[in-house]
Amino acid sequence: MKEKWEELAEVKRELAARDWFMATSGNLSLKVSDEPLTFLVTASGKDKRKETAEDFLLVDADGQPAEATHLKPSAETLLHVEIYNKTNAGCVLHVHTVDNNIVSELYGDEGEVVFSNQEIIKAFGLWEEDAQFRIPIIPNFAHIPTLAKAFADHVHGDAGAVLIRNHGITVWGKDVLEAKKFLEACEFLCQYHVKLLLIKR
Ligand SMILES: CSC[C@@H](O)[C@@H](O)C(=O)COP(=O)(O)O
Ligand SMILES: [Zn+2]
């Protein structure tokens, strides 16, 4: 458990260094056990750039605290629950960035954004020259169970990504390394896309 805590703290530190936790946004989790399912998740409402002994708490398959604590699990824990219940993912990362928000708004009506002709999509295991990488975009329902249900419709594999319109992105992978690689590749694609559109104006 201490090892898992350290692992999650390390990725939180790295994402904080990228300034991907503006205004207390973002939440992260790491699976601790399978049967029963438990995972460490960030405590709600904290400044995720800060490091404290109260950064994470252990929750169960319903997203409820698995141990006595005064901490509240992330408001978006139900999205993490959907991923761990439907896949073999080991880590979930959620960040709000200006560029992922802009891309979600640009393509929100289409329900997805499609990237191609970019070397970095090999990060998603797509090696063909004409490969396309699609990120579904769902509405930002304020009611979290409704949001989690819409989100779950796009949770299929052990690794993936979903954009929530004008909110942020949630990415998952088999472990921290894979989830972080996916997240960085998604952010690369969003940053590139926004910059290119600005240059082309
Ligand atoms: C001001 S951040 C908005 C939050 O509602 C949420 O979207 C978020 O990412 C962080 O919520 P949290 O409950 O701290 O995990
Ligand atoms: Zn969020």
Image (tube, rainbow, N blue to C red):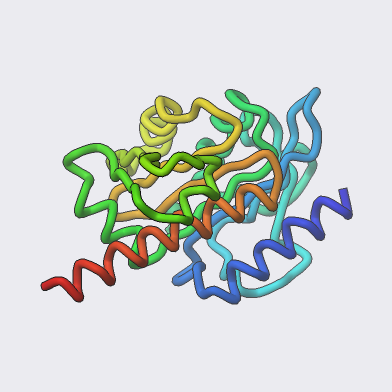
Ligand 2 found in image quarter: bottom left
Question: Where residue 105 appears, x then y in whole percent?
Answer: 22, 53
Question: Where residue 110 appears, x then y in whole percent?
Answer: 19, 39
Question: Where residue 103 appears, x then y in whole percent?
Answer: 28, 56
Question: Where residue 162 appears, x then y in whole percent?
Answer: 42, 42
Residue 19 vs residue 198: left or right?
Answer: right
| In the depicted structure, whether residue 146 falls above or below residue 47 | above
Tally of numbered tags: 0
Quadrant of the drawing holding the C terminus: bottom left
Residue 55 vs residue 47: left or right?
Answer: right
40 and 153: which one is in front? 153
Which residue: 31% across, 39% down? 138
35 and 111: which one is in front? 111
Which residue: 31% across, 59% down? 101
Looking at the image, which residue sits at the far right?
2
Looking at the image, which residue sits at the far front?
129
91 and 200: which one is in front? 200
Which residue: 78% across, 57% down? 7
Residue 90 vs residue 53: left or right?
Answer: left
Which residue: 28% across, 71% down? 195
| In the depicted structure, whether residue 82 falls above or below residue 47 | above
